[in-house]
Image: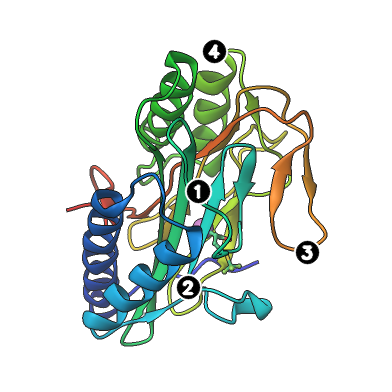
Amino acid sequence: MSVSIKSSREIELMREAGRILAMVHEELGRALKPGMSTLDIDRLGERLIRSYGCSASFKNYNGYPASICVSVNDEVVHGIPNKHRILQEGDIVSLDAGVIYNGYHSDAARTYAIGKISPEAEQLIRVTRQCFYEGIKYAKAGNHLNDISSAIQKYAESFGYGVVRDLVGHGIGDHLHEDPEVPNFSQNRRGIRLRPGMTLAIEPMINMGRADVVWMDDDWTVVTDDGSLSAHYENTILITQGEPEILSLL
Ligand code: MF3
Ligand code: CO
C-alpha cells in the first residue's frame, strides 16, 4: 500500500476542487424542499458542477448512474436519484458529491432535514457532523490513522449509535479512491503515520440503530438493516505541519 504525498501544485488543484464542491453543497442545501424529487437534486447538482467548469466524480464511476448520491432516511449512502422519490417534510436526506477539477477530485457529504424533523433525527445529524470534527482533532502529522478512526467511533457510540463498518473513508487525489482506507471505527493496529501533503476523505456514516447495513437490489443503495435512520458527513482534508486544512468547506 502506498499513500501519496501531494505536491504544492496538486494541493492547489485540490483546494480549488474542494472550494467548488463546497459551493455546490451550499447551493444544493438551499434548494432542498418538500415536493422535490431526488432526481431534481441530481440534475441541479450536475448543472452546478458543470457551471464551475468541473465534472462530477461519481458519474459512471464503477457504473454509478448519476452525479449526486441522494440517500433518504434509512438509506445510508449511494442512493440513486429517481424522479418518483419525492422529499417530504420530516425526511432526512444525505447528499454526497464529488467534483473533478483539472484532474483532481474532491468528495464531501452533508445530511439535511426536510422541514421539521424529530429531535432524535436532529441529534443524529448533529452528532454525525461532530464525529468528523472529533476525528480531525487527530488529523495531524505524526499521529496515526487509527487515532482518527477511534475518536469517531468513541464519540458516535457514546450516543448509542451504530458506526457503519462496511464502508469507509479513503485517500483522494487524481483518483476518487486512493490509499489509505479511513475506517470510522478502531482497528487493532495504529495504521499509517500521517504526513503533510496527504489528502483524505473522512466520512462518518452513523446509524441511529444497529451498525449493520444491506445492499438493495439496484446494487448501489445501502440501507440500515434495522430500518433506523442514518446520517453521513464527509469532507476532503489536507494533512499539514499544523492543523488540518478542510478543503471542501468555504
Ligand atoms: N463518497 C462516496 C465514496 O467515497 C461516493 C462514491 S459514490 C460512487 O465512496 F458512485 F461514486 F461510487
Ligand atoms: Co468518499
Residue 240 in view (yes/no): no
Q: Residues within 10 Å of mark 1 (few under 14, many from 20)?
A: few
Q: Earlier in the sequence, mark 2 or mark 3?
A: 2
Which mark is on residue 232?
Answer: none
Residue 181 location, x and y as percent? 61, 55
Q: Quadrant of residue 216?
A: bottom right
228, 17: nearer the viewer: 228
Question: In this figure, which residue is indicated by the disc labeled 3?
Answer: 219
Report helix, strand or loop for mark 3. loop
Disc 1 marks which amino acid? Answer: Arg
Question: In this figure, which residue is indicated by the disc labeled 2?
Answer: 67
- The residue drawn where x is 51% and y is 56% is 70
Q: Earlier in the sequence, mark 3 or mark 1?
A: 1
User: Going by the picture, which residue comes out furthest to the left?
Assistant: 250
Question: In this figure, which residue is indicated by the disc labeled 4?
Answer: 159
Asked whether the residues under the numbered discs 4 and 2 touch, taking CB atoms below 8 Å apart as contact, a structural biologist would say: no
Query: Is residue 72 placed above or below 200 in the rendered structure?
Result: above
